[in-house]
C-alpha cells in the first residue's frame, strides 16, 4: 500500500475513494473498506482512503478530544491489511478546516484525487462547519462525473451501531469482551519498550514499559494481557496502564507489563499488548509492601483468567 502525506501532484487512472478517520478500524470500517476494494476491482480503478492527521476533534478541542483507539501507524497497518492500495493522509489544520464543502469537492475530490467512485458512511458530513452531506455529494457527482454510494452503519446484536465512540465507552467501562466484538479483535496497544525506573524489578515483578503517544488512553487499570512482538511467540502477562500513584505519580500514562515465563532484554523492541480482561482499577498504596502484595494477587488473578479461558 502506498501512503501519501498530503495529495500527490498527479494521479494516473481513476480512483475509488472513501473518506474518514477510521480510528480503530473496527468492523464497520472493515465492511466499508471491503466494499471499497470490491468496487474498485469491478471498475478497474485503484482503491484509496482519505484520512486525517490529527483527528479533526483534536484540532478543534485538543484537551477535550477523546483518546484514540489506534495510533496513525496502527491505523495504516490495519487499512493495508484490508487490501487498500493507497492512503492519503491529509494534515488537518486551520487552512483545511476552512475549505467549504463545494471547494472540497472541486479541489480535493475532483482535481487532486481524480475520484471516479466515492463510498461514504450514511452519516458523512464534510467541509467548513460540516455543511456538506450525502445529498450535496450526489448532486456534485451528477454534474462532475463521479458516482456516489452510501454505506449504512454496521449493527451488532440488532441495536448497537458499531462506532469508535461506542468502543471507547466500552473500553472505559472495562467491558473488553464487548469492545472486542465491535473491533473484531481484542483492543491492543503497540509501542516501543523504553527504560523505566526499575521499580517493578525491585518489587520482584520486572516490567516492560511503553509510553502512550498523545498522552491519552481509552482505558486505565490492571489487566490480563497477551504480548506479541517477541519473536514468533505470544506471551501472557499482567499489565498496569495508568499513572503509578503509589510510586511517582506522573501526568503521562505508562503501560507497564509483567510478562510471564520470560527473561531477557526487550528494550527497543516493538511490542503489541492485547487487553483481554480487566482485573481492577489503579489504586494508590501508602506502603510499597502493600503494593507488592497486591501485584502478586494481580498476577494470580491473571493466571486464573488464562487457566479458565483455555
Image (cartoon, rainbow, N blue to C red):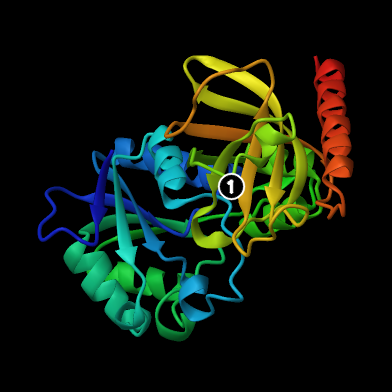
Q: Dot 1: what SS?
A: helix
**Residue 221 x/y as whole percent:** 77, 48
The answer to whether one can see residue 89 in this image is yes
Quadrant location, the N terminus: top left
Q: Residues within 10 Å of mark 1 (few under 14, many from 20)?
A: many
- Above or below residue 51? Residue 234 is above
- Residue at (49%, 24%) from the top-left corner? 265
State left or right for residue 248 relative to residue 147. right
Query: For this view, does 201 lie left or right of residue 32?
Result: right
**For residue 175, what is the image quadrant?**
top right
**Does 9 sit above or below residue 307?**
below
Q: Nearer the viewer, residue 167 or 251?
A: 251
The C terminus sits in image quarter: top right
Q: Quadrant of residue 95?
A: bottom left
Which residue does the numbered mark 1 point to in the structure image?
A: 28
Q: Residue 77: x percent and y percent?
A: 41, 39
Q: Describe residue 145's horizontal placement relative to residue 19 as left or right.
A: left
Of residues 272 and 81, the one nearer the viewer is 272
**Which quadrant of the view contains residue 100?**
bottom left
What residue is drawn where x is 28% and y is 41%? 43
Coordinates of residue 256 in the picture (x, y in percent):
64, 41
| Residue at point 56%, 44% (across, down) | 196
Q: Is residue 185 visible?
A: no
Which residue is found at the position 70% from the left and 39% from the top?
Answer: 180
Q: Nearer the viewer, residue 174 or 287?
A: 287
Front residue of 153 and 72: 72
The x, y position of residue 289, in whole percent, is 86, 40
How many marks the image carries: the answer is: 1
Amino acid at each position: 500500500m502506498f501512503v501519501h502525506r498530503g495529495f500527490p501532484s498527479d494521479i494516473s487512472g481513476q480512483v475509488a475513494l472513501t473518506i474518514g478517520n477510521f480510528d480503530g478500524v473496527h468492523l464497520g470500517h472493515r465492511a466499508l473498506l471491503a466494499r471499497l476494494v470490491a468496487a474498485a476491482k469491478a471498475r478497474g480503478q485503484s482503491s484509496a482512503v482519505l484520512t486525517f492527521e490529527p483527528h479533526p476533534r483534536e484540532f478543534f478541542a485538543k484537551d477535550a478530544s477523546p483518546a484514540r483507539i489506534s495510533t496513525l501507524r496502527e491505523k495504516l497497518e490495519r487499512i493495508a491489511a484490508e487490501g487498500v492500495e493507497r492512503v492519503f493522509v491529509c494534515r488537518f489544520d486551520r487552512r483545511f478546516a476552512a475549505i467549504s464543502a463545494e471547494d472540497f469537492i472541486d479541489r480535493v475530490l475532483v482535481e487532486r484525487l481524480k475520484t471516479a467512485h466515492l463510498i461514504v458512511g450514511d452519516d458523512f458530513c464534510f467541509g467548513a462547519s460540516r455543511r456538506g452531506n450525502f445529498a450535496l455529494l450526489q448532486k456534485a457527482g451528477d454534474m462532475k462525473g463521479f458516482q456516489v454510494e452510501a454505506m449504512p452503519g454496521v449493527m451488532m446484536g440488532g441495536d448497537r451501531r458499531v462506532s469508535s465512540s461506542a468502543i471507547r465507552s466500552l473500553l472505559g467501562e472495562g467491558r473488553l469482551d464487548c469492545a472486542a466484538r465491535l473491533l473484531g479483535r481484542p483492543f491492543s496497544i503497540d509501542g516501543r519498550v523504553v527504560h523505566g525506573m526499575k521499580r517493578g524489578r525491585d518489587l520482584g515483578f520486572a516490567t516492560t514499559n511503553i509510553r502512550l503517544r498523545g498522552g491519552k488512553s481509552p482505558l486505565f487499570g490492571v489487566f490480563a494481557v497477551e504480548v506479541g512482538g517477541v519473536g514468533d511467540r505470544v506471551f501472557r502477562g499482567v499489565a498496569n496502564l495508568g499513572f503509578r500513584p503509589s510510586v511517582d505519580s506522573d501526568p503521562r500514562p505508562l503501560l507497564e507489563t509483567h510478562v510471564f515465563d520470560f527473561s531477557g532484554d526487550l528494550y527497543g523492541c516493538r511490542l503489541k499488548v492485547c487487553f483481554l480482561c480487566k482485573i481492577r482499577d489503579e489504586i494508590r498504596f501508602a506502603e510499597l509492601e502493600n503494593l507488592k502484595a497486591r501485584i502478586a494477587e494481580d498476577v494470580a488473578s491473571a493466571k486464573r483468567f488464562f487457566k479458565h479461558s483455555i
